[in-house]
Amino acid sequence: MNADDTLDYLDRPWRRRGRQTAAVVALGVYAFYLAYRARYTLNPAAPVFALLVFLAEAHGFLSLFFYFFQTWAPRRRRVPAPSGTYSVDVYITTYNEDVDLLRQTARAAVAMRYPHHTYLCDDGRRAEVAALARELGCGYITRADNAHAKAGNWNNAFRQTVGDLIVTLDADHVPQPQLIERTIGFFEDPSVALVQVPQQFHNLDSVQHQVNWDERRMHGEQDVFFDLVMPGKDHWNAAFFCGTGAVLRRTALEPHGGIVTGSITEDMHTSIVLHAEGWRSVYLNEVLVTGLAPTDVSSFLKQRLRWAEGNLKIVIDVNPLTCRGLTVGQRVAYVASMFHWTIGVPKLVFYLAPPWMLFSGAFPIAPFDRRVTLIYLANLACMVVSYKLTSRGRGRLLMDELFNMLNTFTLLQALARLLFQGRRAGVFVVTSKKGDTGSATAVLPHFALLGFSCLAINWSLLGLGFGIDEDWTGAGIGIFWTLYNMALVVGVIRLAVRPSQKRDTSRFRASFAVTTHGASDATRPGITVDVSEGGCRLLWPEPLPVGCRRRLDLHFAGGCREPGRRGDHGAPPAARRLVAARRALRRSVAPADGRHQRRDLRHRGA
């Protein structure tokens, strides 16, 4: 079997050609804009300032090129049937995560349908984790030290097990029952070393999710990467191991003793080494594992700092431009992944340039006439349109800019560590699953940027008001971009100071029919508003006394439609009765204004 035979293009040919044409046109317009800027508009009165802004714009051109290269021809995979000839081990790596959180992952791992052995790889050497392994029938593996952090923990289990394939999971990443069945068939190609699935998250109240519950729309900060960039990398055989939610072949890793160590992003390091040796990777864009995303800004930035520092320092250990064995496509794809983490420098230039213009009166572009304005607007329009086309509806420009603002100072810190620490490996910090209390402190640089921007606007307005400065056009442009950046800063600060998550388990918004018996033994129906492992919120037709104990029967009639609607004829009678009860309950508790009625029920302890 050849894994390439399972590849299909994500788009129809005419759509793919249209998007590729849009990408080429946008790059051509951008290149013309940069050439015009370099030839005619660099301000000789402020050469350093003008050059910094120009180089930041040139960085943007390279970023756009790398994005278009990676999304040039996104692919999807047809899943081959499993042969049943491989032995499979499942590693769940853990250090200090809560046992209840680990139990969810381990229980789901044990329940996967394909025959396998599950191991809890505990770097915390905890008796309660060993007891959990005995409770669930898992293997328990630990060691005397924590050398090489997660990679060392993984390699310790690798030396003590014999499975042909290894499923690797983080402590908070819960697998679906079909994970092994959907991925194992690709290993019929003897050159496939790993199969990676996307990292999706089930706590939609995290920092990186924007959810509109009224319109049933959700956007995640990593959606473009896992839905477009990784399928695009798969076209170049450059999809890489992401640390969890992956299946790896033992024989590919045996020469290295397991995962390659020496980096805090050992997953990408390992992928480059395997690709250089001629192995193939497969990216299957199906949600087969879901985990927990950081719930607060502080944890989010710590995670991004680790990713950025590790990706940048890999260049020192295994430079994809000089590493032997990689194809041209793989080299460009890996350089693109590393180049992405340098975006903090140009973004800082763009954030500081407008207020500096207002303070100093110096402009990076001179003359800023009508021709420059038209060329600039044409370039901006081409970038926006081409991004929207090539992102296939998954990209959100404002959300991308919000997270660029959030990450800027963290990415600068990672770049500083690369420059001043060199080969010295960073410290692997486990991302907190419970949240952190230092989110406001984590965005102190953003508060400083906000204050600097406010002072700049006031300074400019005072100069205009007292007649010291008469350049209303220049001041208007500077104030506009300063206000735009300030709006992004306010969005970041709102993320940082929002109330912290207090629940131990994530709640899922789901409506299921619920019945219970009251004091008179009469069956009463209700509806869940949300459900978690430890509780639920109910929509009930009468007040429930606080502190009372009642048995609730949840009826999971999944897929059944309401009576009278098309497709209901196949529903079982019990399910139809429950759905009818649900409709009757909605009418009884939401007569004229359902929102106020439901809010009243919640206040009364429902």
Image: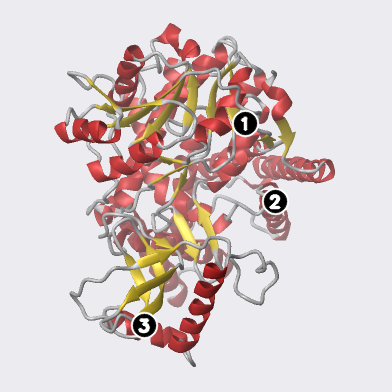
Q: Is residue 297 among what the camera can see?
A: yes
Instruction: Relative to 585, say whether 35 is above or below.
Output: above
Q: Residues within 10 Å of mark 2 (few under 14, many from 20)?
A: many
Q: Closer to the camera, 423 or 16? A: 16
Q: Closer to the camera, 256 or 419? A: 256
Q: How many marks?
A: 3
Q: State which tag comes first along the sequence, 3 or 2.
A: 2
Identify residue for label 3.
599
Name the secondary structure under disc 1.
helix
Instruction: Relative to 586, say whether 416 is above or below.
Output: above
Please name the residue shown 66% across and 44% down the image. 37
Q: Residue furthest left?
A: 127
Residue 242: percent from left, percent from top: 46, 31
Q: Residues within 10 Å of mark 1 (few under 14, many from 20)?
A: many
Residue 233's mark? 1
Q: Residue furthest right?
A: 14
Residue 311 relative to residue 83: left or right: left
Residue 280: percent from left, percent from top: 60, 19
Residue type pointed to by label 3: Arg
Name the secondary structure under disc 3.
helix
Rounded to the nearest whole Å, what is the CA distance between mark 1 and mark 3? 48 Å
Q: Nearer the viewer, mark 3 or mark 2?
A: 3
Identify residue for label 2.
379
Contact check, label 3 and label 2, Cβ < 8 Å: no
Q: Please say which color scheme the image uses.
A: secondary structure
Residue 594: percent from left, percent from top: 46, 86
Residue type pointed to by label 2: Asn
Rounded to the nearest whole Å, what is the CA distance between mark 3 and mark 2? 49 Å
Instruction: Relative to 342, say whether 269 is above or below.
Output: above
Residue 257 relative to residue 77: left or right: left
Residue 368 relative to residue 446: left or right: right
